[in-house]
Amino acid sequence: MRLWYLSRPRLLALGVVLICLLLAAGSAGIAIDPNNRVFFSEQHEQYRELLDFEAVFGTSTSLVFVITNGKSLDQSQDVQQAVKWLTAQIWRVPHVTAVNSIATFPKVDTTTTEVNVTTYLDFICDEEEQCDPKRASALDSPVVANNLVSADRRSFAIVGGVDLFEPDARQVDEIFEAAQVLRQEFVTKFSDFRVYLTGGVPMMRAFVDAAAADSARLMPIAIMVLFGLLWLFFGGVVPALIMMLLGVISVASTMGVAGWFGHVLNTATATVPLITFTLVISNSMHLFFHILREDLRAPTTGIEDIVSTAVRANWKPMLLTSGTTVLGLASMLSVSAPP
């Protein structure tokens, strides 16, 4: 007995294509979440304490430039100039609301009669940019050592405080691109220095890049490998292409539904297209093997009857394997990570 929807194959194919196109259109609305806290459970006690603290005192992250030319302040005037220049220019980066470096961090000296407040850089170096090696030992103070200056006093950090109350990929890109422009200007002006970008914003950008790279790199590899294996198993290009088409349509539809519902991608969910593709291919292989086997066993049987038999014989095993996979992935909802 044929399944009713196989009696009009053209109408069925047209309906499937239209539905898939409608669903796939939603994939244009999918955004990538740069938030590096995506793995933290909002129910976790420590994370809740952090959120409560930020609700009172504000939310901020950081953008850190680490510069070095292998010399200390008293060994090269360029070090002092580089720290001052970058400390002044980092304000050009959008959303920067505070800057910390040895050129801004206060150095307090007290006597019995007075209190002198200056910066660590001004304490060590005079107005003529001559730095006192003896005063350079002030950089060993625990408030700046391994914070704004390395233990060997040859690497210096310029830390920008960045306000991102609701970080999104556009803001992170804006800040990171501005930081890269500033980094290039610094390298042009101080060519003997090495510059490294770190902090919360570069980490968020790394999350975005990792999610995009996973989607762009893993899917083509999976498609090529699976296509070769399917070609080998089925002994023909056409069955392999049909199954690959099913996988691509399923991925486009799944991501489209996610887009319509406003979901976002992050490093944890960037592999969803690959997982969907693999599940569809593995399930459809059961049907295709059954169809090919029945076609060889009874070549006079109509294709509609063969397909109907294959669906009836395989829908329960396919549902079972898919259901257990869903349950396995859903168990990750119970996992939380401390902040």
Image (spheres, grey):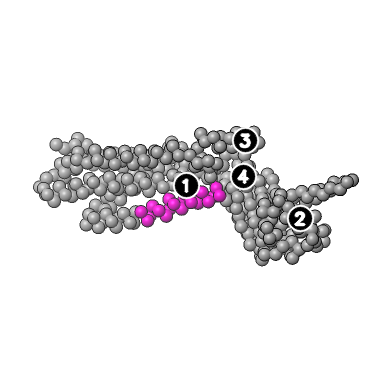
Secondary structure beneath label 1:
loop
Q: Whole-Å distance between the Cαs marked 1 and 3?
A: 26 Å
The residue identified by callout 2 is 138
The residue at 47%/41% (across/down) is: 264
The residue at 76%/59% (across/down) is: 136
Amino acid under label 2? Ala
Task: Give yes or no for contact between labels 1 and 2 (Cβ–Cβ under 8 Å).
Answer: no
Magenta residue check for 284: no
Judge whether 107 appears above or below 54 on screen. below
Can residue 158 be seen in this snapshot?
Answer: no
The residue identified by callout 3 is 53
The residue identified by callout 4 is 61
- Mark 1: give few (<14), some (14-19) or many (20+) Cα within 10 Å: many
Q: Quadrant of the C terminus?
A: top right
Could you tell which of marks 4 and 1 lies nearer the N-terminus? 4
Q: Quadrant of the N terminus?
A: top left
Amino acid under label 3? Phe
Task: Give yes or no for contact between labels 2 and 4 (Cβ–Cβ under 8 Å).
Answer: no
Question: Of helix, strand and loop, which mostly describes the magenta segment?
Answer: helix
Q: Whole-Å distance between the Cαs marked 3 and 2?
A: 33 Å
